[in-house]
Amino acid sequence: MPRAVAINVGANTNLPGVRGPIYPDGRFEYLPIPEREPVSEPVPTYADLDLDTALPEDILDKPVHLDPTFAEYSCCDRYTYGDDYGVKARPLLDLAAGDYVFFYATLSTTRRDVDTQGAGDDPASWIAPEWGAYVIGQFRLASDPLSGEEYGALSPTDRAWFDANAHVRRERFDAEVMLAGDHEESMLYDQAFPLSTAEAGSEANRIVTELSSDSGKGPWWRRPMRFEPSAVEELLEIWENEGFERCFS
C-alpha cells in the first residue's frame, strides 16, 4: 500500500503578495510563486500563464518559479517537482515509486461572478470564509525520488524529463530532491480538497489532525505532512467521491 507526503506550494501573501483563488463551487486557480534566483534560460512570466486571476500589473512580467509542473498547466507537459529545502526534501526522499505526493496551497475565497451590488454565488459549505488550505493536485511517483546528487548523475536523456522544472532552469541547480509523476495517476485537480475547517482557514480539519503526522497546531499550513497507507486510501476515496463532509467528522 502506498504512503504519501503533502507539501505546501504556490503563491501566498508574502510571495507575490496574493493567493490563488478558490471559487464558490470549489474550483480554483493554481498560482506559482515568483522566481527569486538567477536563471540560465528564459522562464515563463505571470503574463505567459494566461491566468484568470487579476494580478497587480507590476508583477505580470516577473518570471515564475514553475514548480511543481503539471501536464495540464500552462507551459508544462509533464509532472515534476524539485525542492531545495531539507525540511521538505527529507520526507520526500523517504518515499518510493508508487507512493503519492499531495500538493496543497493556501487559497483566497472568491466569488467568481459578482454583480454591481457586490453579490455573487455563495461558497460551498466546506469552503473557509476568507482563506484556507486545500489540496490542489497529486503525483503518483513514476520512480523513486532522486537526491540532488542522483539527479546530477543521470544521463542527459534521463535529465531531459525535468527540463521544464524551475530548479533545473536556475543558473545553479539547487534541488535536494527531484520527483517525476506518473502520467496516468498524477493530476492538477479540477476541484480543491479542504484541509482547513469550514470556520477558519487557520484551523485544521481531521485530514490533518487525525490522518496526517501533523498536530494541526501553529502554522500547520506551511509544513510537510506524512500519511500512512490507510490514510492515503481514505484520502483518495474522499476525493474520488467528492465526499468532503468526511473531512470534518
Image: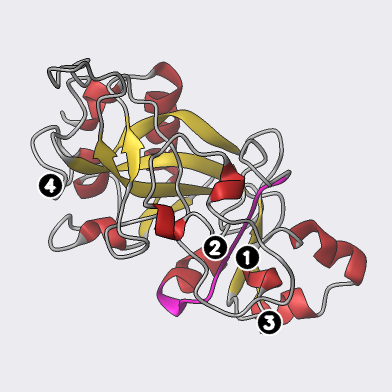
Q: Is residue 9 visible?
A: no
Q: Which residue is mark 4?
A: 203
**Which residue is found at the position 62% from the left and 65% from the top?**
166
Q: Which residue is mark 2?
A: 65
First reached walking from the N terminus: tag 3 or tag 4: 3
- Tell which of 118 and 237 is nearer to you: 118
The question of residue 81 being in magenta is answered with yes
In the rendered view, does 32 fall on the left or right side of 82? left
Q: Which residue is mark 3?
A: 171
Label 3, label 2: how far apart the Cα atoms are: 13 Å
Image quadrant containing the C terminus: top left
Crowd around label 2: few <14 · some 14–19 · many ≥20 (10 Å): many
Q: Secondary structure at mark 1?
A: helix
From what the image shows, is residue 49 above or below residue 247?
A: below
First reached walking from the N terminus: tag 4 or tag 1: 1
Q: Which residue is mark 1?
A: 166
Q: Answer yes or no: do the residues labelled 3 and 1 have beta carbons within 8 Å?
A: no
Label 4, label 2: how far apart the Cα atoms are: 28 Å
Magenta highlight range: 78-87
Label 3, label 1: how far apart the Cα atoms are: 10 Å
Crowd around label 1: few <14 · some 14–19 · many ≥20 (10 Å): many
Q: Answer yes or no: do the residues labelled 2 and 1 have beta carbons within 8 Å?
A: yes
Label 2, label 1: how far apart the Cα atoms are: 5 Å
In the rendered view, does 45 fall on the left or right side of 157? left
